[in-house]
């Protein structure tokens, strides 16, 4: 991918974040998501790429825009695969909570794992513990190996995971080991990236979240020279073995088999993000540990974007000031 494309992708996540911001704290996550999806698609279709959505809003019969397999871009230029999450944290946006992002990853054709929209167990560390993880081993063994790689005691290790009932026992077990645990309500993409940021206290992300978010995270983790392993899990393995969950879970496992992917087996970082030629972009909607959120004063809005290029290992933080009342169809056709 040409270097100048990275800036174009940052404009895509900025647009999605600004559109989602219009619904901040209004209690309607579907409206927020729809606005961000529309803005993201408008901007993608202005870029000179032959783009294909490989992780998006769902199947064609479930999503009117940015569905898996949809072609985006002008059709001319680099052939790329695109993984998007127009709002990573729709509920957080609707409720005005921290750490909501607009996020995307772009890579060479075939760069990303194609997997059903299901659950994924994730274990992620920064560059200092690269090579020290093995998701097939017990968690306590991994934590000890990570602490040893980082040359710190277990009591100085910080792990982030989602504050979900499925993790209650895991949180208690880690605290019994003396590990410090940060439990967050949603948004494990931001938490994943924090493992690789030098100014972050987070050493490890562990837990069960969405597989699409896991693949998007993998692109950033590879670019930042961290390490990650994952394991695809069916719904009934995570949410309880009820008839409805079993039905959904068996369909997920069938789709895995059709796609040639083994569920319940370890996936390495290179299985999920297969190329260094990736661009990752994320723009904050609400402020959190990774990025500042949108702020608005009158007709001016300020955004912060994290832009990572895998080939050069370049990490940029871009602060942009947007004039919202300009009649500019390129930038803000969705802003009211």
Image (cartoon, grey):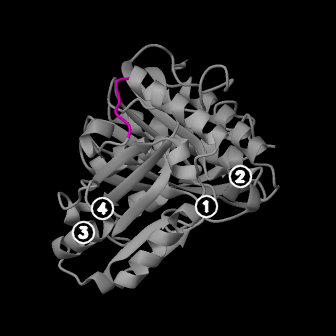
- Does residue 251 sit above or below 326 in this rendering? above
The residues tagged by marks 2 and 3 sit, at their Cα atoms, a distance apart of 42 Å
Give the side of residue 240 with respect to residue 113, left or right. Answer: right
Residue 125 got which mark?
4
Image coordinates of residue 45 in percent, x first then y, are: 56, 23
Q: Is residue 89 visible?
A: yes
Q: Quadrant of the N terminus?
A: top left
**Which region of the structure is painted magenta?**
259-263
Numbered disc 1: secondary structure: loop
Give the side of residue 144 with respect to residue 246, left or right. Answer: left
Q: Which one is closest to the eye, mark 4 or mark 1?
A: 4
Residues 305 and 65: in front is: 65
Q: Which one is closest to the eye, mark 2 or mark 3?
A: 3
The residues tagged by marks 1 and 2 sit, at their Cα atoms, a distance apart of 9 Å
Q: Residue furthest top?
A: 75
Residue occupying the point 24% across, 84% down: 153
Residue occupying the point 82% across, 55% down: 26
Image coordinates of residue 48 in percent, x first then y, are: 46, 21
The residues tagged by marks 3 and 4 sit, at their Cα atoms, a distance apart of 14 Å
Give the side of residue 129 with respect to residue 124, left or right. Answer: left
Category of crowding for the residue at label 4, using alpha-carbon neighbours closer than 10 angstroms: few (below 14), some (14–19), many (at least 20):
many
**Is there a contact, CB below 8 Å, between mark 1 and mark 2?**
yes
- Does residue 155 sit above or below 32 in this rendering? below
**Is there a contact, CB below 8 Å, between mark 2 and mark 3?**
no
The residue carrying mark 2 is: 21
**Is there a contact, CB below 8 Å, between mark 4 and mark 1?**
no
Q: Main secondary structure of the magenta part?
A: loop
Image coordinates of residue 78 in percent, x first then y, are: 36, 20
Q: Which one is closest to the eye, mark 3 or mark 4?
A: 3
Numbered disc 3: secondary structure: helix
Residue 293 got which mark?
1
């Amino acid at each position: 991918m040409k270097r100048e494309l990275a800036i174009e992708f940052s404009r895509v996540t900025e647009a999605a974040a600004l559109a989602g911001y219009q619904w901040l704290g209004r209690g309607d996550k579907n409206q927020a998501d729809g606005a961000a999806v529309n803005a993201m698609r408008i901007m993608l279709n202005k870029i000179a790429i032959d783009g294909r959505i490989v992780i998006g809003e769902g199947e064609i019969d479930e999503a009117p825009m940015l569905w898996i397999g949809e072609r985006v871009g002008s059709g001319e230029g680099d052939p790329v695969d695109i993984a998007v999450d127009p709002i990573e944290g729709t509920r957080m946006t609707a409720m005005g909570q921290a750490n909501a992002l607009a996020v995307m990853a772009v890579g060479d054709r075939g760069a990303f794992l194609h997997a059903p929209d299901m659950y994924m167990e994730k274990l992620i560390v920064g560059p200092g513990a690269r090579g020290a993880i093995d998701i097939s081993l017990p968690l306590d063994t991994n934590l000890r190996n990570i602490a040893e790689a980082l040359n710190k005691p277990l009591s100085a290790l910080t792990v982030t995971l989602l504050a979900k009932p499925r993790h209650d026992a895991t949180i208690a077990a880690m605290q019994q080991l003396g590990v410090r645990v940060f439990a967050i309500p949603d948004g494990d993409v931001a938490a994943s990236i924090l493992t690789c940021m030098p100014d972050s206290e987070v050493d490890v992300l562990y837990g069960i979240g969405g597989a699409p978010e896991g693949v998007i995270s993998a692109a950033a983790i590879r670019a930042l020279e961290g390490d990650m392993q994952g394991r695809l899990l069916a719904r009934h393995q995570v949410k309880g073995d009820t008839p409805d969950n079993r039905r959904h879970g068996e369909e997920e496992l069938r789709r895995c088999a059709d796609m040639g992917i083994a569920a319940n087996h370890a996936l390495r970082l290179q299985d999920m993000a297969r190329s260094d030629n990736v661009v990752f972009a994320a723009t904050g909607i609400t402020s959190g540990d990774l990025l500042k959120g949108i702020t608005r004063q009158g007709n001016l809005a300020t955004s912060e974007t994290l832009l990572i290029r895998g080939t050069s290992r370049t990490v940029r933080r871009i602060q942009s000031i947007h004039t919202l009342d300009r009649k500019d169809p390129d930038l803000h056709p969705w802003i009211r």
